[in-house]
Amino acid sequence: MDIRKIRQDFPILQEGGGKKPVVYLDTACQSLRPRSVVEAVSQYYLQETACAGRSMHRLAAEVSRSVDQSRAALAKFFNAAKKEEIIFTRNTTEGINLVANSLGLKAGDVVLISDKEHNSNLIPWQIQAKKQGVVVKIIPSRPDNTFDLAAYETLLGPSVRLVSLGYTSNLDGVSIPASEIIKKAHQNGSLVLLDAAQTAPHRSINVKALDVDFLALSGHKMLGPSGMGLLYGKYALLERLDPFLVGGETVASSTYTTCEFLPPPEKFEAGLQDYAGIAGLGAAVKYLQGIGFDAIQKQETLLNECITNEIKDIPGLRLIGPADPKLRGGIVSFYIENIDSHRIALMLDQMAGVMVRSGQHCVHSWFESHQIRGAVRASLYFYNTLEEAELLIGSLKKIRKVLG
Amino acid sequence: MFCIVAFIVLSILGIFSASNRELARESLDCVLRRVTLRPCNTGFDEKMKAKILGVVITRSEGAAIFLNRNFELLSWTFFVLLLASSIWTIRGVVLFYTTGSCNGANSSAFCVFDPSGSNNEVSTSSSQVCSMPVPAKFLTARLKNIDLDLFPTLKNGSSQKIVMIACYHCEYSRKAYPMIRDLVKQFKVDLAFLHYPVKESTDYFSRVSYCVNKLEPDKFWTFNDQMFSGDAMELDDPAYLNGLLTSVGLDAGQVNACVADPQTETVVKEQMQEIVKTGFFGTPTVFIQNQVLVGPKPYRVYAIALEGLLYWLK
């Protein structure tokens, strides 16, 4: 993988023009976009502006074909059985909400989640608990924040209707043993929903091999456009699910009192879709395939090891998650005792143009329970270089020295 | 304390930049919290501190360490300095309005509102150089023990009297004189005119002035007004001066005869001695109430000295 060449695909990383260089270490929030994705999006607006599946003219046919191609490409990318198992959403949050509201959960049904879920995979279940009487149970992690299979098995009782877990944590980059979790859930008669927002950009996901029932992800973390995501669901399950958002494009016909819903995925895709976003997401997975996940993981591990080894001995610095960087993918989360995480992030940007995330990263529940005010998160991707990692390290050491 | 300083600074910067305007809004929120004795929990001070440290650290780690350790103290220091400079600025504005100089009456130190110092320029009595700064020791000029009856006086029946020392050839006197005349007209006060030839090599024009007032006191002020209008260089032309005397109804021959009279020389010398006794530095010097105004001030300064700040209501 020629990083120098790859970086040329990302206009924002280009130096010159008197601008301060950008050291972008916030991919876990959203990734940068290569030129091909931006071009795919702009092509829709400049040359293919039309409604798919409604109008009969040439432009509409082109958009329909483009949407269909993207759906097929994404199905292939995740090894879905058929392209109709891919439902376009705005993001992971919408995908999880769709399942939460369509699964027909009843009072007493148990939903298992982990103790470090993103709010996207916590709040929808809290609402179900309030509205439907669903019981939400929390699987505690091990002390090093890795998944505790034993605790999971203990909680996996007969009432567990759904196991909804973040595949890879946005807090610390730790991935769960998904295959094993899914196998045990199915043995228990439970369904499994995976929040793959932080997984899909970094490693290959084979939904058929995983045998996962639902999988939600966002495009904006995997080079795709903002406001574009998808929900994978086994077709048989999708057929049984009630639609969440309804209206235009979801029905074959309607009377004043009744309607006939289209089969999946259309019955879940209400209203005019983000055709530009769909085309952009198709271009994004094509770009990722070109890079290859082996190369991506290799680069992320290299950078994570470099950063971890250099910062772990900074006085007062505490890494979140396991000590072994190989278990944390592209994420290095840490806090320095008695120093506000936002201050560190602002100083990193100001002094070196290093952009990291600070705060509680939408995992307030975990921070509250651990009584930690916040953390700094550097999230790495294949376009980051060792020089950038060293800049982060050097700047952090300086900050530590100055802030005492 | 930092947010107060930041609010003032950012408000000024915000005039030119939208991003600073946004920060100014944040700092205002912080200020409002502080003045209502609530904690500033907007994170504004933290954010700004981090940004400042981020810049300083790239230049000097030592300075960044010092700044971090003493941030609150430095904030207070800047606040006090800001407060002091604000008070100083307001004082300067008030002084400029009331005296024509940011630094107080007749001060020729730099004033941003009058960068050329035109309000304090004088023709000096000690040399022929104009525009010299007025030394403080000359500001002690007083009218005590001066016999003003020796000089032409315009009487309006007022208890207030303006005394003006001026020179027909001094460009600053020529600038101030019309304003003094307007002032006298508007507020009906008495005016004594003391001619002192700072720009002239002889006392010839002082003699002319004396003689006109001696011969035709009713026509003196018309004559005086004419002397201060037009081009000062023309006054040196005898034909022009004779024409001017004639135009205001005076007998030029009679005036010239008076000028040549040795008795006139004696009186004028006496006048000069009286003027010198005032301790004045140059022309124009105007005495209003107990104030001495040196140099051509704006009209409002003379009016304020005479009638106070609310002169425009009268």
Image (cartoon, helix red, strand yellow):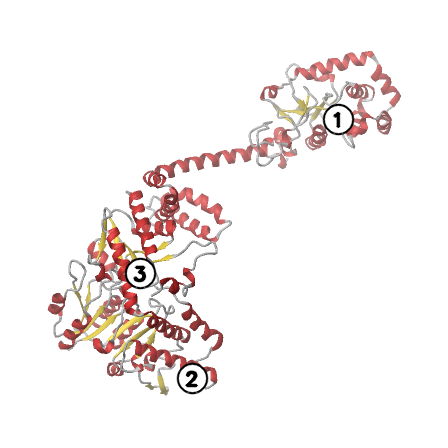
In this picture, residue A72 sits left or right of residue B199: left
Q: Image quarter for residue B294? A: top right
Disc 3 designates what residue?
Answer: A380
Residue B42 visible in the snapshot? no
Establish if A319 lies above or below A158.
above
Establish if B263 lies above or below B171.
above
Closer to the camera in the image, B222 or B34: B34
The amino acid on which the numbered mark 2 sits, given as a three-letter code, is Arg
The amino acid on which the numbered mark 1 sits, given as a three-letter code, is His
Disc 2 designates what residue?
Answer: A54
User: Disc 1 vs disc 3: which is toward the camera?
Assistant: 3
Crowding around mark 2 (Cα neighbors within 10 Å: few <14, some 14 to 19, many 20+) is few
Disc 1 designates what residue?
Answer: B169
Where is residue A172 shown, x and y percent of the image?
24, 60
Q: Are marks 1 and 3 in contact (CB under 8 Å)?
A: no
Q: CA distance from mark 3 to mark 2?
A: 41 Å
Establish if B32 lies above or below B310.
below
Image quadrant where one finds the N terminus of chain A: bottom left
Where is residue B283 shown, x and y percent of the image?
68, 24
N-terminal of the pair, mark 3 or mark 2, is 2
In this picture, residue A56 sits left or right of residue A101: right
Closer to the camera in the image, A252 or B219: A252
